[in-house]
Image (tube, rainbow, N blue to C red):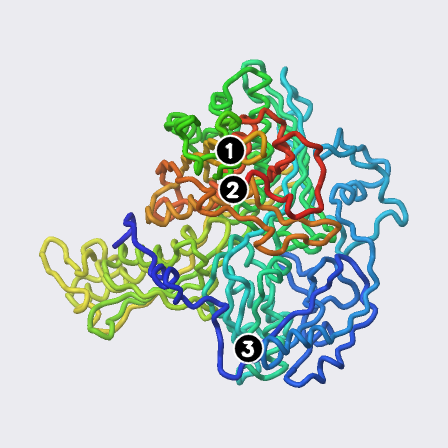
Amino acid sequence: MGIGASVPRPDGPAKVSGTFPYAGDLGLSGMLHARTLRSPHPRARIRRITTAAARRMPGVAAVVTAADVPGRATYGLIVADQPVFAADVVRYQGEPVAAVAAVDARTATAALAAIEVDYEPLPPWTDPERIVAAARGPGSPSPAGSLCAGGPPCPDGLAGPGAFELLHPDGNVFREIHLRHGDPAARGAVSVTDSYVVGMQDQAFLGCEAALAVPTADGGVDLRVATQWLHSDREQVAACLGLAEHRVRLALAGVGGAFGGREDITLQIHGALLALVTGSPVRIAYDRVESFLGHPHRHPARMWFRHTASRDGLLVSVQARLILDGGAYASSSPAVLTNAVTHAAGPYRVPNAVLDGWVVRTNNPPCGAMRGFGVPQVAIGHEAQMDRLADALGIDPVELRRCNALEPGDVLPTGQVVPDPLPLREMIDVLAARPLPPPVSARTPVTSLPGGRLAAADPARVRRGVGYAVAYKNLLFSEGFDDYATARVRLETGPDGTPRAVVHSACAEVGQGFVTIAGQIVRTELGVDEVVLAPADTTAGSAGSTSASRQTWMSGGAVRAAAATVADRLLARVARRLGLPDDVAAVPRRLLTLAGGEIVAGEAGVRMTLADALADGPVEAVEVFRHRRTQPLDADGQGDVHVAFAAAAHRAVVDVDVDLGLVRVVSMALVQDVGTVLNPLSLRGQVEGGTAQGLGLALMEELVVRDGVVRNPTFHDYVLPSSADVPELDFVALSHPQPGAPYGVKGVGEAPTCSATPAVVAAVRDAVGRDLRRVPIRPQDLLGLDDHESDDPEDVGGGQ
């Protein structure tokens, strides 16, 4: 089945039955087991590390620390600022200090306990606002009001001698962006101002980090690992091991979800180093607690917005100040800030904008990529502001969004012209027309009420709320990044004598569906039934990262280009065999067509089966696919920054028990511009998953960090939405093909995450009539209690 068909995932049955081999299932006879020693302190000096007792333990094969790293001491996705092992100072709770390899996991764990680390704890810097204030310098003007809800104004003058130490030699600010568009002083007749806080969300993938490292005869290492970007991992691992890249070979192991959390190096270097030191295969795997500590999370945000409009509801200006907490190391923070600032005004026509953003280093856990990549945070702010502006103007919030929605040809705050298509008004109109669920009544089953049990079953105390939100999200990499993907397609005769195509790509399949899309593309281009997807590894050219909604566009584009080249080469071969003129062999599609497993030669009606055409041997092609170039932001935040955009609009309907502070999401409706649909089944899975993650951020998901210490690093206290929490999605796909993309495709997985959260928050706000400025919403927010930051993880995630 080719493009447009609902092709089931080939790995689906194995995953459902429990036989799919995930990275955590890897093993070899005689392998060693590795564990990592992590700092219990968010900030401390290391006076001494003593490993002698651990090394003497029976069954311990190796203990490694920073002194044993043979190559570059640091790594990083964008900036190499993160040590393989902390040597002199630790900068976050959970930072690796040493690693051990032993005959079994129990011995390895015992060896960790035998390592003595003499720490001098230091006061952690965990407030990103104070770090921004210090970076602004003494005497600089203080922001008008606080960037965080309920807090004091940002202090001045904290950058004096001794006021702030550098948390890292690279500095305390990863990046700041100051975007100016139109007249900075422009103001409308009506103004709304408020501040918002977004907590730290974890990707919470089901399969924890795991890898198997095997030393090789050439002094290198083979590494099978669950990751999102094989070639980036190889580059960083090779640099830290002091090896040429060709001696570090990576293959993709089974991935149990990613959502951005596997873009960064976690255990790869530790496992590979131990394999080289011991000369034995090494398995390294995290449990859930270590996973929470070991990978970057979604950036917490503190945001201040001012929206102004004319009295008839047209936006005049948007001001925003955004502070993202990047944690101890850079990860992808500079790029996340780009997305946050450039999307801060939302998918609306804004003639005047002043948008300032900082992403700073703290002693909190590192933060990086997560589905939506900076846009979910600002969407929470700009959509709450649109609702407040609608209230102030006395205009329906749906109509306010409609009349201000961007259209192709409009100019974004970056100066970039909105490309076609961006059917926001059509989306809003379709969403507003979707039917609403029936209201709560005495006949409503108790299981359909908030809480779902008799203790919370008084319909008279349940309030219904409806909320809308619209968001747009950039697709692919931005700011001039030279993004590309490579693919090889080989058309050959299979073992059974029938034609088949073999696709080789380093694209990391993390659940997005490349395993189906690649086959559909090749069947469409070559007319062959059997398509084999070779294992993803670094013997193929780079496919880039499985992130930024890019793989169907980029790696799909590479597969299509390679398949088209194979078709041309095969047709040229056939043309020569048939004795056709040289000009036909040079451009064979002038006379020959390939479809349905056979080749037809023009009006003469000459036909040849694909099997006959392959009698002279296989045909192969390797192609590299690139998208159009973009530009970095200039000093005023201007530039043709993003390749393209996807947009989504959600309506949420919620019921709230106003006595107990419980929320039930009754209905979620989604209208999304999805470009050309290659696989309707895969599309449905992506938008449902994105909606569920947005719902989780709205009501329950928060990694609680107090004074730099993670308080809830287990699924007992980090609450995820279950199937009982997520209603069936009322989904309408608008198909407007994307120019420049193969088949007109668009990435679809991120946009619904961006609009789902503010829609749920808006519905809860509508139900309770309270000013909700913090996400996730907690019971005390619903009940109007004091706005305190509880130290109790049980307080995390209201509404369930």
- Read off the residue under disc 2: 694
Q: Residue 743 placed where, x, y %?
A: 34, 47
Q: Is residue 397 left or right of residue 498?
A: right
Q: Residue at x 60, y 80 (%)?
A: 276
Q: Label 1 vs label 3: CA separation?
A: 48 Å
Q: From the viewer's perspective, is the residue at label 1 or at label 3 nearer?
A: 1
The secondary element bearing badge 1 is classed as: helix
The residue nearer to you, when weighing 421 against 450, is 450
- Read off the residue under disc 1: 759
Amino acid under disc 2:
Gly
- Can residue 789 be seen in the rendering of this structure? yes
Going from N to C along the chain, the mark reached first, 1 or 2, is 2
Q: Residue at x 48, y 73 (%)?
A: 26
Q: Label 3 vs label 2: CA separation?
A: 39 Å
* Callout 1–callout 2 Cβ contact below 8 Å: yes
- Read off the residue under disc 3: 221
Q: Residue 447 placed where, x, y %?
A: 44, 38
